Amino acid sequence: MFVCICNALRERQLRELVRDGVRCEREAYARLGCRPRCGLCLPIARRIVREAEPAFAPPA
Ligand code: FES
């Protein structure tokens, strides 16, 4: 699934970056050599990064 249309960034890429140590969505974009443009993807990118990183998961 595409998360960011402006940068053709996929959910799978974000999850792989979290496994490689990325801890926020902006760091993920930077690692991929891009940056948010319109910004519409940021909330879902943030959620994906937090879900992929168990330590960031909200308390149940
Ligand atoms: S959809 Fe990601 S910056 Fe526009």
Image (cartoon, rainbow, N blue to C red):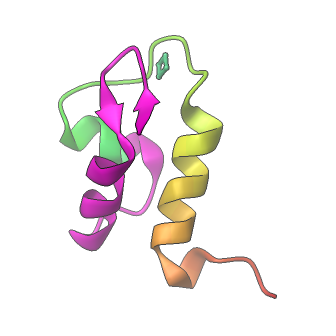
Q: At 27% from the left edge and 72% from the top edge, which residue is drawn? A: 19
Q: Is residue 14 left or right of residue 49?
A: left
Residue numbers of the magenta segment: 1-26
Q: At 52% from the left edge and 82% from the top edge, which residue is drawn? A: 54
The image shows residue 51 at horizontal and vertical percentages of 55, 68
36 versus 49 height, above or below = above
Q: Which picture quadrant has residue 17?
A: bottom left
46 versus 37 height, above or below = below
In the image, residue 25 lies in the stretch drawn in magenta: yes
53 versus 29 height, above or below = below
Q: 27 and 46: which one is in front?
A: 46
Q: Which picture quadrant has residue 15?
A: bottom left
Q: Farthest bottom residue?
A: 60
Tally the numbered discs.
Answer: 0
Placement of the C terminus among the 4 image quadrants: bottom right
The image shows residue 18 at horizontal and vertical percentages of 33, 65
Q: Which picture quadrant has residue 43?
A: top right
Q: At 19% from the left edge and 37% from the top edge, which residue is drawn? A: 32
The image shows residue 44 at horizontal and vertical percentages of 60, 42
Q: Is residue 26 left or right of residue 38?
A: left
Q: 41 and 23: which one is in front?
A: 41
Placement of the N terminus among the 4 image quadrants: top left
The image shows residue 39 at horizontal and vertical percentages of 57, 20
Q: Farthest right residue?
A: 60
47 versus 4 height, above or below = below
In the image, residue 54 lies in the stretch drawn in magenta: no
Q: At 55% from the left edge and 29% from the top edge, which residue is drawn? A: 41
